[in-house]
Amino acid sequence: MKRILFRDVEVIATFDSQGRELKKAWLFVEGNRIAALGEGEPPQGPYDEVIDGRDRVMIPGMVNTHHHLYQTLFRAVPGAQDKKLFDWLVFLYERWRGIDEEAVYVSAVVGLTELLLSGCTLSTDHLYLFPRGKRNLIDVEIEAAKEVGIRFHPTRGSMSLSRKEGGLPPEDVVQTEEEILADSERLILRYHDKSFGAMLRIALAPCSPFSVTPTLMRETAKLARKHGVLLHTHLAETLDEEAFCLEKFGKRPVDYLADLDWLGPDVWIAHAVHLNPQDIEKLAKAGVGVAHCPSSNMLLGSGIAPVPEMLSAGMKVGLAVDGSASNDASNMIR
């Protein structure tokens, strides 16, 4: 195993339960584990590599909990500015319907590299768009992530409702439920690594309550739990979504998820902007996590997520850059 020493680091912020910050510190890595750390002079070697940490701050690698890497190629598109979510989606679907394997690969390499350069060592991705004839796009993303060297947890997204079924996307970017479930299981069996410290894991992620049927939501949850993988979706991002759920299902988004057996510690949701106290209580009790996307929420005018209230209720809340079409960057610091 390779032995690496970081020495003379100005500050190591441990983010442990005591919030310790080590000054003029060292950190020893053996293989893929942090073996030891401390202040002052490091232990004598031998080491395979010694890295000078002077004028540097070291923190644990950041985790990006929600992304759409394919959108890296769609930053600052003029016609997509100053729009609310539904209008923004309708406009961009007409551009996204032309993406292919090369576009997905290039966008993933660029987006994941940008994340690494801003201190992110683990990212998920939510790829729910599969233009007709372009089936194995997540495989392409996975190859890009291996090349970049980042720990990667892609989610197999899905949309089954086109405009003619009451959804937002054009017909040529949605799939049948049979196609979605078959490919979801294929990806799990081929790529999902359950081992500790795995570099690659798969999760399942229907796009949103207005993008798929209740049947697909339920069947996806069953498949995920059959194989022990996580579940993810967009939820409570906008007031339009809330109105859609009330009109179509007679329930608020969180109650709709509960009816579909989608509340549990194996679920995390993106955005969670429009939650009332009862919603937060239900999510916290079930152990549901949240991907907080402040930059995207601001750009699309979706609102401000009640993060303090969620944290006070004991919920797990992580940061996320979201797709670059609603952020213009894949930078965890900005």
Image (tube, helix red, strand yellow):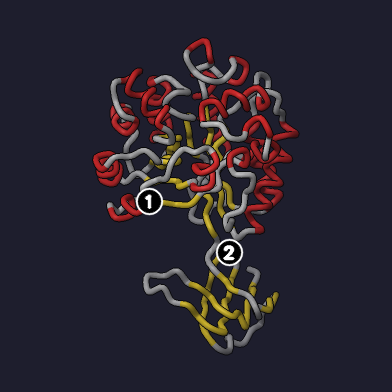
User: Can residue 5 be seen from the camera position used here?
Assistant: no
The amino acid sitting under disc 1 is: Val
Is 221 situated above or below 195? above
Q: Which residue is mark 1?
A: 307
Q: Residue at x 52, y 65 (%)?
A: 60
Placement of 91 over or under 172, stated as above or below? below
| For the residues bearing labels 2 and 1, Cβ distance under 8 angstroms | no
Element carrying mark 1 = helix
- Residue at 53% x, 14% y is 163
Of 205 and 118, nearer the camera is 118
Disc assigned to residue 32: 2
Which residue sits at x=59%, y=44%? 327
Point out residue 179 in the picture as x, y percentages from the top left corner.
Answer: 54, 20
User: Percent from the top left, x then y, of residue 298?
Assistant: 51, 44
- The crowd level at tag 2 (other Cα within 10 Å; few <14, some 14-19, many 20+) is few
Mark 2 or mark 1: which comes first in sequence?
Answer: 2
